[in-house]
Image (tube, rainbow, N blue to C red):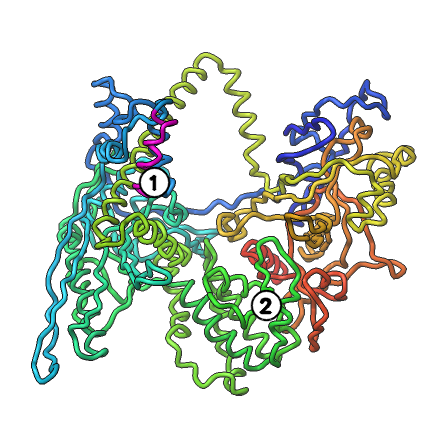
Amino acid sequence: MVYEEAGERLSGTESFGYSPSGTDFPYPSPAPSPPREFPPSPVPLDGAANPPIVLAAQDHPWPSHPSYAATVEDDVEDFPQPAGLSEGTRPLVFESQRRADLKSHTSRYSPFNTKADWELAEWLMRSGMSQKARDEFMKLETMRESGAVPWANNQAFLRKVDALPKGPGWECESWTVIGDEMEEEGEVIQGSEDVELWKRDPVECIRELMGNPAFRDSMKYKPERRFRGTGRQCRVYHEMWTGDAWWEMQKKIPTGHTVAPVILASDKTQLTHFSGNKSAWPVYLTLGNIAKHVRRKPSRHATVLIGYLPVPKLSCFSTPERRSIEGWRLFHQCMTKLLEPLIEAGRDGVEIVCADRHVRRHGLSANPEQLGYKKIWPFWVNLPHHNIFECFTPDILHQLHKGNFKDHLVKWCLALAKEGDIDQRFKAMTPYSSLRHFADGISKVKQWTGTEYKNMEKIFLGVIADLLPPKAVKATQALLDFIHYARYPIHTTDSLARMESALTDYHELKQIFFDEGACDSFLIPKLHAMSHYIDMIKAKGTADGYNTESPERLHIDFAKLAYRASNRVNPTKQMSIWLQRQEAMNKKRSYVSWVEALYTQRRRQRREQVEVIEDEVIAASVSQNSHRDGNPRHILTASSSKSTITEIATTHGAPELHTALKSFLSLHISPLIVSQIHSTDHISVWFRTRIDLSLPSDILYDASTDGPDIIEAHPAKPRTKWTKSKAARYDTALLLQCVIRSENCLPRAGYQACRVRAIFTLPRKFQQVYPPIPLAYVELYEKFRTNAEINTGMWTTKRLKRAGTVVHEVVPLGSIHMSCHLIPRFGSHTWRALTKDTALDRTTQFFLNTYASLRMFSLIDHFVLVENT
């Protein structure tokens, strides 16, 4: 890690990969090593010279804890019979193309002449410019004279794009729907309506996915069972191949063959906002062989579009009931046509060249997941290897976030609360980095999306605490626990037991809403659906792999953007052409990246052969920077100009900063040096830090499920001519002050909440005796109570005071383990004068918000488990 000051102003992004003793999980740990002795410096203590300091991970005076980073190795049981066997090898499409390019001395960027032409073409296709705008751009006199654009017009440009290798082609099948007989002005007429089904061969789409080299390290070809602990008693569920369904399916197909679980998703979406009333009905396909974190990233293109279903008005039918029936009949007819190639492929199997060059025979197993059905002859009747009743995977977005939580539980709680109380508490909620502030409460939100549902879940329990009857609060806690367990990216037998316990508690406690008249009945399909979650996780892996938020996001790329690129007249054909061109560009981009990676690999191999020592240096560097020790790494951004200690104390509301700095220097360096710190000394201040924290593998958490962990500490900004005023913000965090060395201590005892008032470094003159690592000036809260609050299950705290004054300290920034959210304990009375900017200052008691992030929920769930066992 390199930390360098340039001039009098610090800016940009600095990364500090260090951690003081105790900044890890409070497990038993070996005794700390003695403090590091820094060598004397030729620069005087008060001197101005300050050369850059290189501070490696081992250069800080606090040892890290190996116990924190201890990983849990899963015991893997392979399928007992041969599965996913290779029937030989063949070159990948990219390899064949590369050989052809080399043989013909063709550039990797062909049909584009140069790398610059390719990059310009890529930008033009991604920019969202209309064809007319592109044409005008290419005809600009500046472009023509400079020769920067090699195409005369947009038509010439598209000819180049159309020369790129393409994926599976599109075809249109059309027919006429005959309506029923209607009498109009005494005359019997029979209407009709033409419909179009745009489709692609799903088997060819599967070939494209299976053979994509980009997925080589994210593919699995046979099932497995994973266990944790001794005796194979605790099962682990993660990806689809760790579930029971794939294992059982593998038994039913010929030995050595490969199961390719086909995941389908479909939903109608609106294309126009204000006028036009245009809709599209895309059908998406992906594979369970691809890791779920890859499937849910649109940029990885692991989910492909295989068809557009027609969205007719069906006005040729006389009644709404008949139109509804005929609409679903048409849906199943279209899906039957669309998936027809899967019948033979699933029954007989197909040979596919996989991403590792091996040829495997795949039996395709269709899983038509998030599709709505009515009582009509269904399209799945002839699809092999499936039980439709086992194909409906958990839908976290619509069944939990929207259904059980927003549409039902929130509605019931609002009915029990005094009007306006819940809204007022939402308005006064303390800020947090990943939390949306409901400035007008929740009753006036006009458009609800998954983001609003999840943000409301984060704070809802703290909002209704002490406001609603205890049973209603406990029921809310049970449902929120279930929802967060359902979001776990990894499950074990034990975590599923806790998930089932939460569901049982919710069913037992929800009667309060019926008794109080908040609801009429619990005969709710989405409420019943929760009873199937645990069985489905055991069968098909964790529910986050099937979250419908992913296909909802794909509507933007595959429907809305494609529609905007058309001229709105018979748009489906234009949309299919636009998508095929986009896919061709994506495919070319993957090919270019693949070739460049080959060159990089070969250069590295040649360098390794020539310089073995250099390889050792690189390996050591990678080892130091891989950040697998589990200690927090703070990345500082948004720095300000240097200010004096007095100025920082005033602007940041840190009156004891000077005194706290003296105490810190006396404790960590020497009492003799305290006289060297003056209130007029300049220090560098940062307004924000991002914490990069990798939790141990025994905590069931995946960092990709949450956003960045941010802590802000900035003063108020006055209004200017061009900008609005901005209130001061000083976030709360979890400080790990000590390491628990006794097995009788509870994990929570090592943690202490704090409020970060300022992030800074010592003046330059101290850097020869103390490493130039950032510090934090914090307000301290009391250690968390031994027992959680009885109704919410959340830990509680209040400000730490001595002689009636709030305690402040200067601590190493690395001792701040992660951000946290403190919810004011509003009590039974709602204080209407409270705001989000004053809640932390004017409230006396607080809840540690368990639901602020999945990271926090997983951590506290783990701690409670440790404490109970």
Q: Amino acid at mark 2?
A: Asp
Q: Position of residue 58 (x, y in %)?
A: 67, 30
Horizontal side of 8 relative to 538 (left or right) equals right
697 displayed left or right of 289: right
* Any part of residue 732 in sight: no
Q: CA distance from mark 1 to mark 2?
A: 41 Å
53 sits left or right of 204 in the view:
right
Q: Which residue is mark 2?
A: 440
Residue 677 location in percent, x, y?
87, 35
Magenta span covers which residues?
130-144
Q: Position of residue 81 (x, y in %)?
A: 26, 47
For numbered disc 1, what is the local secondary structure? helix
Residue 768 position in % (x across, y down) = 79, 26
Which quadrant of the figure has residue 12?
top right
Q: How many other residues sit within 10 Å of disc 1, few (<14), some (14-19) or many (≥20)?
A: few
Label placed on residue 343: none
- Examine the rendered structure and indicate whether residue 660 appears above or below residue 54: below
- The residue at which mark 1 appears reads as 133
Quadrant of the image for the C terminus?
Answer: bottom right
User: Which is nearer the eye, 238 or 50?
Assistant: 50
